[in-house]
Image (cartoon, grey):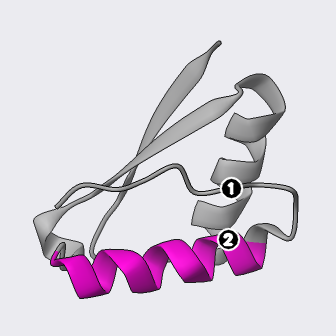
Amino acid sequence: MTQSHTQLGKHGITENFISTLKDHFKNHENVKISVLKSAGHDKTSVKKYSDEILEKLEAGIELLGFEV
């Protein structure tokens, strides 16, 4: 199982970020996303980001969990 890692920063979820995630999923089974402090990493914000990412990826992607 291959895993990739990317970070979500102060610019939030942009088209470029989604494009980068799609590229990561082409080559890896799992992608770990770290939410930086500048993006707001409280539990509510992280849940909101995860829902938005899943919606924008429009694929059979599932959320395995998240940490704050």
One can see residue 3 in this view: yes
Disc 2 crowd, CA 10 A, few/some/many (<14, 14-19, 20+)? some
Horizontal side of 36 relative to 34 (left or right) equals left
One can see residue 12 in this view: no
Considering the image in quadrants, where does the C terminus appear? bottom left
Residue 6 location in percent, x, y?
44, 43
Q: Nearer the viewer, residue 1 or 35?
A: 1
Q: Earlier in the sequence, mark 2 or mark 1?
A: 2
Q: Secondary structure at mark 2?
A: helix
Horizontal side of 14 relative to 10 (left or right) equals right
Rendering quarter of residue 15 = bottom right
Main secondary structure along the magenta-highlighted residues: helix
Mark number, residue 14? none
Location of residue 4 with respect to 15 vertically, above or below: above
Residue type marked 2: Leu
Which residue is at a point 56% across and 80% down the rendered structure image? 51
- Label pair 2/1, CB-CB below 8 angstroms: yes
Q: Nearer the viewer, mark 2 or mark 1?
A: 1
Which residue is at a point 73% across and 58% down the rendered structure image? 19
Q: Magenta stretch?
A: 42-56
Q: Nearer the viewer, residue 51 or 15?
A: 51
Residue 4 location in percent, x, y?
53, 28
| Residue placed under numbered mark 2 in the picture | 54
